[in-house]
Image: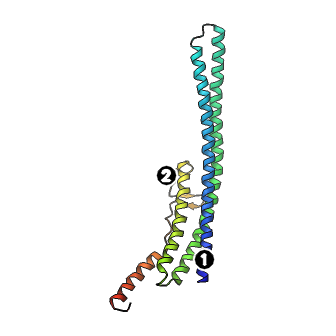
Amino acid sequence: MTNKTEMIKEMTSKVIEVQDAQEAVYAFLEEIEETVAEGTEAVSQMQSVVEAKKEAMSVFTDFGEVKMAKAEIDSLEADMELLKQITANKAKAMKATLEDKAEEFFKAHKSAVFFFTNTDAYFVANTTLATIAEDEQTMQGFANSISNSFASVRQVLLDEQIVAQADQNRLYRGIHLGQAGKVTELNTYHRLVRGYARELKTKGAL
């Protein structure tokens, strides 16, 4: 029982590592969105100034005033384009860092999957009729947590167009994005045991 308790403790730690790595991806994604939003807001404010100056220019009758207003408007519009470019450049650079965050997540995920496979095999070998339902619930809970985190980070890569939709089930930095979610072998084992237990009950042995 001590071994099982220790393995649950270790598996819990692995799942937390995966979830922390997932949260790091989400946190940096939020930084990207904030940067883009700030740039968009700055462009919007500049656009309002341009519109106001264009409206004011429409009533000018002096050549000098019109010429000066036109120069101001042209300068502001040029600055707007530069600001759009700067925002796009920042987002592009930050997406490269986001990819690194995703790669860190996948490393944690891979480690958790490896440990899950070993832990699952141990549970299958050491479960009992009295504990199999609880063991199955425990291991499937771990499996769901790992799989849900993977699906979430994978979706971020697709949403941010870091990975094209056409490549959503292909390799990305050595990680197979189309991998199936984890399922404990205790699910299959429990079905077999339930069938066997029903037979024993039928025979009056249970």
Q: Is residue 90 above or below residue 111?
A: above
Seen at 53% across and 84% down, the residue is 126
Q: Is residue 38 above or below residue 163?
A: above
Instruction: Indicate which disc residue 166 carries.
Output: 2
- 109 and 22: which is toward the camera: 22
Image quadrant where residue 199 sits: bottom left
Residue carrying label 1: 7
Callout 1 amino acid: Met
The location of residue 10, given as percent across then percent down, is 62, 73
Q: Is residue 114 left or right of residue 135?
A: right
- Residue 185 visible within the image: no
Query: What is the distance, in whole Å, between disc 1 and disc 2 at their CAs?
Result: 39 Å
Q: Is residue 124 above or below residue 157?
A: below
Q: How many marks?
A: 2
Secondary structure beneath dot 2 equals helix
- Residue 51 visible within the image: yes
Q: Nearer the viewer, mark 1 or mark 2?
A: 1
Callout 2 amino acid: Ala
Instruction: Indicate which disc residue 71 carries.
Output: none
The quarter of the image holding the C terminus is bottom left
